[in-house]
Image (cartoon, grey):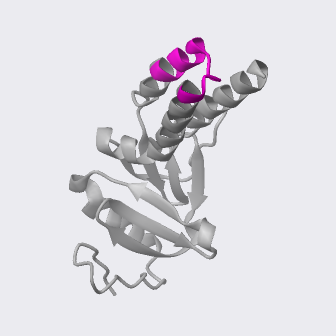
Amino acid sequence: MFIFIYILVGLAVMWTLWRAWLPIGVTAPGRLLLEVPLGWRERWRWHRRNFYALTALLVLGALGGWLPFPLSAMIVICVPGIMFIPLRYRFTEEGVALNNVFFRRWEEFHQYRMEPWGIRLMGAGRMDSVCLYLPAGIRGHVRSVVDRRLRKSTRWPAKAQDPTQEVRR
């Protein structure tokens, strides 16, 4: 029983780490147009689903008595340390990348929408969108890069009841 729990917790922590850093990752091809380092708020937004899942695992394991203390300590020590891994978006002529974790080509997107937390790049399918969590001061620069790359596309219409979302035609 305990070996299954060790594997489950280990994979959950590794998955959280892999969203910030990969030992062998992808490089962003093309000429660099803009590099955007992410602050604490944006890093929290990027990792929050994983942190919520690990917190639920920690609480349920402690209440149920099936999570040994060494594993609880590993979660409490390792997971906040992942927040210290710097994250940065790299916008190139070919596409957009986050560290060495993912790279998506501009051709994969057909529209975008400005959000209160950054930009949502929409792909052809429902699961093809990418949320770019951006610091407030750099959103205009990123928007100009995205607008030039997706200039032949339409923008996703804003919701009429939400004045914080900005969409230009």
Q: Quadrant of the N terminus?
A: top right
Q: Is residue 83 left or right of residue 22?
A: left
Please name whichever residue, 32 or 10, is drawn nearer the observer in this view of the structure.
Answer: 10
Please name whichever residue, 129 or 26, is drawn nearer the observer in this view of the structure.
Answer: 129
Q: Is residue 23 visible?
A: no
Report how many numbered discs are placed on residues in the image. 0
* Position of 18 relative to 84 (above/below): below
* Position of 98 relative to 114 (above/below): above
Q: Residue at x 54, y 19 (%)?
A: 72
For this orientation, the residue located farthest to the top is 70
Question: How far across and down, in percent of the image, does residue 28 sit?
Answer: 56, 48
Q: Is residue 69 magenta?
A: yes
Q: Is residue 12 visible?
A: yes
Q: Residue at x 34, y 83 (%)?
A: 159
Q: Residue at x 42, y 38 (%)?
A: 87
Q: Quadrant of the C terminus?
A: bottom left
Q: Is residue 161 magenta?
A: no
Q: Is residue 15 left or right of residue 147?
A: right
- Residue extent of the magenta highlight: 63-76
Within the image, what quadrant is residue 48 found in? top left
Question: How far across and down, in percent of the image, does residue 14 sit?
Answer: 62, 30
Main SS of the magenta part reads helix
Question: How far across and down, in percent of the image, does residue 99 sit?
Answer: 50, 40
Q: Residue at x 47, y 38 (%)?
A: 51
Question: How far across and down, in percent of the image, does residue 4 sit?
Answer: 77, 26
